[in-house]
Amino acid sequence: MAKQKSFLKVAGTLDGLTFYKSVDGHLVRTKGGVSKGRIMNDPAYIRTRENIAEFGTTAQSGKLLRNAIGTMLNRAKDPRMSSRMIGILSKVRQLDSSSARGERVVSEGLLTLNGKQLLKGFDFNNCLPYKLYFMHLSI
């Protein structure tokens, strides 16, 4: 990912380049890749469609979990918590041995001992400065 170094901070698309701001600063990228229609219909992309389906169900499971404990997350200031959680839930989903590829779900992976172990001790607030602040308050 390219980073903008100039004083001019642009947002939007200009001549095939997309400028945007993230927690990492102002970034720029080019548009590329295969069209959505081809991915959804071409037999060569069947594995991609399986991955899309599984990622979708994993993202829904993550949202369900975050909503269930939403009040406890109010003070967490970690902007990458959702993506870290999706990573863990993806590993849990892969433990689902009863479903076919493309149809695996997190709930089946959680029934295994390894699936429970992966979620055990998940840090919902991995933001170090905020952790230090909390540690100072608890002393």
Image: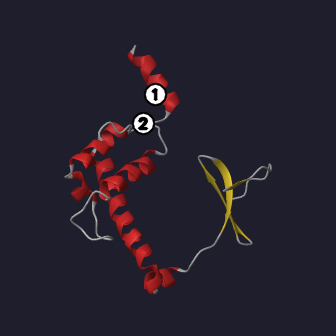
What label does residue 125 carry, if any?
Answer: 2
* Nearer-N-terminus badge (2/1): 2
SS under mark 2: loop
Q: Height in image: 22 above or below 14?
A: above
Q: Quadrant of the C terminus?
A: top left
Looking at numbered disc 2 in the image, what kind of residue is underneath it?
Answer: Asn
Q: Height in image: 133 above or below 114?
A: above
SS under mark 1: helix
Q: Are marks 2 and 1 in contact (CB under 8 Å)?
A: yes
Q: Quadrant of the N terminus?
A: bottom right
Residue for badge 1: 131
Looking at numbered disc 1 in the image, what kind of residue is underneath it?
Answer: Lys
For residue 93, which quarter of the picture? bottom left
Mark 2 neighbour class, 10 Å CA radius: few under 14, some 14 to 19, many 20 or more: some
Residue 69 placement (x, y as % from top left) = 29, 43
Cα gap from disc 2 to disc 1, whole angstroms? 7 Å
69 and 47: which one is in front?
Answer: 47
Q: Height in image: 85 above or below 77?
A: below
Left or right: where does residue 23 sit relative to residue 124? right
What label does residue 52 carry, if any?
Answer: none
Mark 1 neighbour class, 10 Å CA radius: few under 14, some 14 to 19, many 20 or more: some
* Residue lying at 62% horizontally and 46% vertically, measured from the top left: 24
126 and 49: which one is in front?
Answer: 49
Residue 19 placement (x, y as % from top left) = 68, 60
* Residue lying at 38% horizontally and 17% vertically, measured from the top left: 138
For residue 35, which quarter of the picture? bottom right
